[in-house]
Image: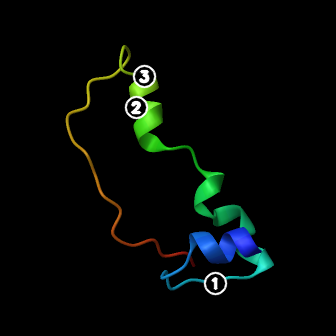
Amino acid sequence: MADLERQTAGVECRKDRGVIDEIPDAYKDIDAVIADSSDLVDVVHTLKQVVCVKG
């Protein structure tokens, strides 16, 4: 729970056990994934997440 609160500081979101699997550490770093795949893909655009809405 402390990691959830630390990683989502300044972010308007739920901060309870029901969303613990959604903290940033649950995801791979996209830059590292792209770098590891550089011989397989050509990056033509880079997108930036603006908002995430979960129902």
Disc sitting over residue 38 in the figure: none
Dots 2, 1 in contact, CB < 8 A:
no
Decide if residue 20 is on the left or right side of residue 42.
Answer: right
The residue shown at (71%, 62%) is: 21
| Residue located beneath label 3 in the image | 37
Q: Distance between the residues labelled 1 and 3?
A: 33 Å
* Quadrant of the image containing the C terminus: bottom right
Decide if residue 52 is on the left or right side of residue 4.
Answer: left
Lower position in the chain sequence, tag 1 or tag 3: 1
Looking at the image, residue 37 lies above or below residue 48: above
Residue 55 vs residue 3, the one in the foreground: 3
| Residue located beneath label 1 in the image | 14
Q: Where is residue 40 in the image (x, y as percent from the top left)?
A: 38, 16
Looking at the image, residue 7 lies above or below residue 10: above
The residue shown at (50%, 86%) is: 12
Q: How far apart are marks 2 and 3 (CA)?
A: 5 Å
Q: Where is residue 13 in the image (x, y as percent from the top left)?
A: 56, 83
Q: Which amino acid does label 1 sit on?
A: Arg
Q: Which amino acid does label 2 sit on?
A: Ile
| Residue located beneath label 2 in the image | 34
Looking at the image, residue 52 lies above or below residue 49: below
Decide if residue 42 is on the left or right side of residue 4.
Answer: left
